[in-house]
Amino acid sequence: MEMLDRAEQLNEKVATPNLPNEELPGKTPEDAECASEENVTRESLLKTIEMIVADDSEIVADDVARIKQQFYTLHNELTLRRKDEAGEEGEAFTDTEDPIEERFKAALAAIKEKKARQRAEIETRQAANLDKKEALINELKTLGADTDNVNRHYQRIKEIQSEFKEIGEVPPQNATALWKNYQDAVEAFYDQWKVNKELRDYDFKKNLAEKQLLLDEARKLTEEPDVITAFRRLQSLHDKWREIGPVAKDVREEIWTSFKDASAEINKKYQAHFEERKARERENEEIKTALCERIEALDFSKPSTYQEWDAMTKTILEAQEEWKKAGFAPRKTNTALFNRFRALCDDFFGRKSEFFKKTKNEFAENLAKKTSLCEKAEVLAESTDWKKTTDAIVELQKEWKTIGPVARKHSDAIWRRFIKACDTFFDRKKKVNGDTRRAEQANLATKREIISRLNVIASDENTTPREQAIAEVQQLRKQWQETGHVPFKEKDKLQDAYREVVGTLFDKLDIKENRARMADFQAGIEASAGDSGKLSRERERLVRACEQRRQELKTYENNMGFFNSKSKNGDSIVREMERKMQHLKEEIAQISEKIKIIDSNI
């Protein structure tokens, strides 16, 4: 190992900010992470991140990421405790605006801008240094090739070496090749041409003494108990080693081998340290996964008494205490595990809160709303403005679905009153809409013919080539969409038959519309894998969309529990709600799959 990766050297050489529990010299963020987390608070992490913003030194991305992870772990736990406390008191939980989090976000944004400026300045400076050093190397080669005047050039050679050392760093991707070219040019000057022996021997002796000192320091570092400090100091020794000129040929390989061996021992300890930390993180991951599985095994729908809810609450709180005692899991799974655990706890306390919050006042309020809708529907039942009134009644039906349940003793009566008013209007409308019925009958015949043709394609006897069959299916689906309404009583049965045969054809012909869209989504996410901010924003958007659909599904399920009508139109509304519930479930499954894809790329 003669040259370490230059990009790693740049990161290791940047000054590390003082973390909240970093008090002794030589301590690093890795040490702080291993320390007790009891002394770390959101306020101390905020103070640290704001100190990084104010500091003029270069920002270390790993340190910022670690502070961010610690902050949001504490922040999420605080939010969870607040919600737990709200659930215990039976009051609705509403999280308030957090000024500490807002300041923390503002500091992160400032660090991002500052990092970009620093990176641009470093790259510009490194590019200029590369040009300067390449010019000196070219001059070295030119002077070395002038064999008749080597002794006269000796002083200039020393000046070039001094200038080369004083010039700063170059782009990491050019560092190794540049240093090799420089060493080759210097060694060629000393080894290939006749240089004044006394001067050459003096330089060799001086360089050997300097490299021997570096070797001694490297050997002492093998005994350094702090492997992080030892590793970083070793990088500094390597930088100094490269700046020192060549030594005599007879000791050149020996001293480099000794220095390399000492470096290898330190690097081995450094690697072992991180392997040990990874092992601890994997152990923590297993502990947290087991906690999630333990909670998932509980049946949240089972408790029906206060005592049963209190017993299960005790189990949940014990699991939360165990979670707090567990350390960090690997970065790629830690956030996903926390979100999984928090979602389980939120689900439990949400159910518990709902159990305790159902009161007679809520039922009375819902009954008043539904009574008002009944009165509006009864006024519209005798209208002859068919189009406008139909739209109005449909809006009333939609509004009805959004209203929560009422007391069971009123449920059937209020529903029968509402559906009777709706049926009265639609029965009157049917009697005067003969032309509409004839058109609907024609559309019914057309759609039945479409279903029949689709069944022929789906039959085992059909031998149509796959591409032709897919084209026919798509054409028939387009014709279906273009065909107008059918009689209302035939609508559900016809739609079910169409959906069934289309589903069969999708499986048979392997038409992968949803899978293709999901593949496109995954490709887009993988293309943005380096932009964690963009992925986080997309994930938050999907989580909100998923939660919105869950709430809609929950509302439908609550309303379904109170529908008990035997009328034709009432049954149709129930079937329509069942179709929408199934659609919501499919959307929730698709969104959840997208969230998993994002989590695997963060």
Image (cartoon, helix red, strand yellow):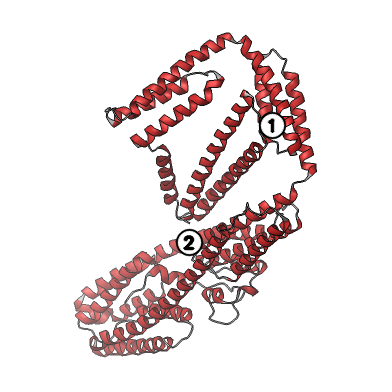
Residue at the image point whose x is 29% and y is 82% from the top = 246
- What's under tag 1, amino acid-wise? Trp
Residue at the image point whose x is 50% and y is 50% from the top = 595
Toward which corner of the image does residue 189 lie, by quadrant? bottom left
Q: Could you give the CA–CA distance between mark 1 and mark 2, rounded to whole angstroms?
A: 45 Å
Residue topped by disc 2: 332
Q: Does residue 519 sit above or below 530 in this rendering?
A: above
Q: Earlier in the sequence, mark 1 or mark 2?
A: 2
Q: Does residue 438 sit above or below 509 in this rendering?
A: above
Residue 121, percent from left and from top: 48, 62
Which SS class for mark 2? helix
Q: Is 201 or 539 nearer to us in this picture?
A: 539
Which SS class for mark 1? helix
Q: Is 170 or 262 nearer to us in this picture?
A: 262
Question: Which label number is shown at residue 153?
Answer: none
Residue 225, percent from left and from top: 48, 85
Q: Is 49 or 205 nearer to us in this picture?
A: 49
Q: With 525 as the anchor, is 570 left or right in this view?
A: right
Residue topped by disc 1: 400
Q: Of circles 1 and 2, which is in front?
A: 1
Residue 68, percent from left and from top: 57, 63
